[in-house]
Image (cartoon, rainbow, N blue to C red):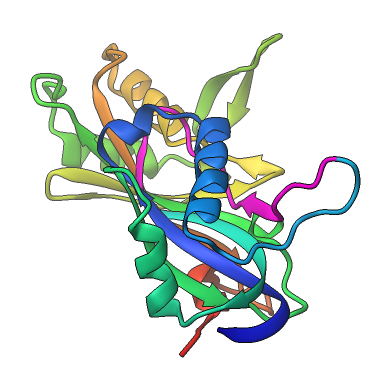
Amino acid sequence: MEEVSALKIRIKFAKRGYMKFIGHLDTMRYFQKVMRRADVDMVYSEGFNPHQIMSFAAPLGVGLTSEGEYMDIEVNSTESSDKMVKRLNEQMVEGIEVLSYRKLPDNSKNAMSIVAAADYHIRFRKGYEPDIDIDEMFSRYISCDSIIVTKKTKKSEKEVDIRNGIYEAKVLDDKIFLKLASSSGDYLKPELVMNGFYNYAGIEMSEYALEIERREVYAEDSEGKQFVTLESLGEIIQ
């Protein structure tokens, strides 16, 4: 084992299949157990109730799958990235797979605080495809200068313009691609974008119409000019 004090580690993982029905808190508890079972040399907080130093980039909504989830941990020591990915995946249930394990610079901010955008793929569930020319209608929808939708909270509803939160949008073969704002202060759900599309097209959207997959999560680069993946901010441990 390589003896290093308080290394910051970023883990990328996928969440597939039936695991899409597991909420964020249960996912967090699951990973805490995995770290113990995989004998990861975790750093624990101090105090009367020590807990593993662990945080997630952007909680994934229930019902969504993902190929680009991130969590940050701190460890006292570690093996190589390849060996740690293997150790963790040996403890995984079907539907969750660790994709990478990388060391972050000592001065790195945690993933949650730097998330700026996310990519999504959206497919229409078989039997729920809208009876419209999706390419033509979606192109018209996304070309609008403003997109007003009703945003619901636990206490109220209000109309908001979501156009500035849609960084990129297009139809790709059998799916729609979206790059959306995902910071804590400006978080746009793909469901809201699609609700707006259905309203624009003048059709009602079924609760089960869409299959949504998060593909990647981004931060801004050091100059704030472009997006970089959270994975790219870490380096592979040899």
Residue 180 covered by magenta stretch? no
Q: Please give left or right for residue 88 compared with residue 9 in the image.
A: left
Residue 59's spot in the image, x, y percent? 55, 40
Query: Vertically, is 112 above or below 105?
Result: above
Q: Quadrant of the N terminus?
A: bottom right
Let me know if residue 148 appears in the view: yes
Position above or below: 165 against 127 = below
Residue at image position (27%, 13%) is: 206
Residue 50 in the image: x percent, y percent? 80, 47
Number of numbered discs present? 0
Tell me residue 154's x, y (percent): 66, 12
Which residue is depicted at the point 53% across and 45% down? 33
Q: Quadrant of residue 216?
A: bottom left
Q: Quadrant of residue 115?
A: bottom right
- Camera-side residue of 200 and 67: 67
Residue 56 highlighted magenta (yes or no): yes
Say left or right for 44 vs 149.
right
Who is closer to the viewer here, 141 or 158? Answer: 158
Answer above or below: position of 11 versus 180. below
Magenta stretch, residue numbers: 49-67
Magenta stretch: dominant SS?
Answer: loop
